[in-house]
Image (tube, grey):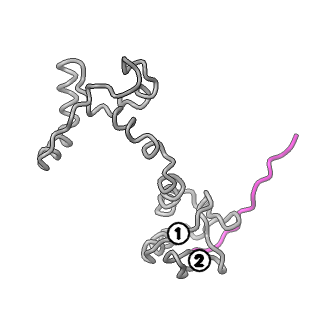
């Protein structure tokens, strides 16, 4: 039986990291080497204060863990974690909303009145803040009762059913 090789994690103090100018703005480095997110993206931003905020959050943990140049610890919800998600998922435009915006929009339940009067009343009360905000802008939320897909019946469309807000 093969044992899974565990990568080595070295721990350093946040004060060992520095912010250096680069062609994209500023970059976080350790001993002149770029620090990477767990997905391998460089920790780079146009504003130095954003990077300083990320580093300042690490002060409360004492040490940060690096596997190679990838920062893997602390595994907490932080500005660094949000940055990593943005670089890995949002900036790549590979998440569902970017790939299937029109289908996600068509599947959003806010555009479809509920089937019965009691259900519609409950629906409207939940969405009243949205309706009020749109009314304040002089807008009206359209109804998408018509189906724009490839099937005669929307319920036959797996993509429509799976992306609909229930």
Look at the magenta stretch and give its main secondary structure: loop
Asked whether, in this view, residue 83 is left or right of residue 124, the answer is right
Residue 11, image x, y percentages: 67, 69
Question: Which residue position holds label 1?
Answer: 58
Say left or right for 32 vs 115: right
Mark-to-mark CA distance, 1 and 2: 11 Å
Q: Residue at x 59, y 63 (%)?
A: 41
The disc at residue 127 is: none
Identify the residue under disc 2. 17
Residue at 61% over, 74% down: 13
The location of residue 37, given as percent across then percent down, is 59, 62
Magenta stretch bounds: 1-15
Q: Secondary structure at mark 2?
A: strand
Bin the neighbour count of mark 1 within 10 Å (Cα to Cα): few under 14, some 14-19, many 20 and up: some
The reply, left or right, for residue 37 in relation to residue 11 is left
Q: Quadrant of residue 14?
A: bottom right
Front of the two marks 1 and 2: 2
């Amino acid at each position: 039986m093969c044992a899974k090789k565990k990568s080595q994690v070295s721990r350093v103090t946040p004060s060992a990291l520095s912010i250096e100018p680069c062609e994209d703005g500023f970059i976080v480095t350790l001993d002149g080497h770029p620090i990477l997110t767990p997905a391998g993206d460089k920790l780079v931003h146009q504003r130095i204060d954003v990077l300083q905020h990320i580093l300042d959050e690490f002060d409360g943990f004492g040490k940060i863990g690096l596997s190679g140049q990838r920062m893997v610890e602390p595994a907490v919800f932080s500005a660094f974690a949000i940055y990593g998600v943005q670089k890995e998922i949002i900036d790549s435009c590979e998440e569902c909303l970017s790939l299937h915006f029109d289908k996600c929009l068509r599947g959003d339940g806010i555009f479809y009145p509920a089937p019965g009067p009691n259900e519609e009343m409950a629906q409207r009360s939940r969405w009243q803040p949205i309706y009020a905000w749109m009314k304040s802008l002089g807008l009206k939320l359209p109804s998408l009762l018509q189906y724009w897909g490839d099937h005669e019946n929307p319920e036959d469309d797996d993509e429509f059913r799976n992306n609909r807000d229930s």
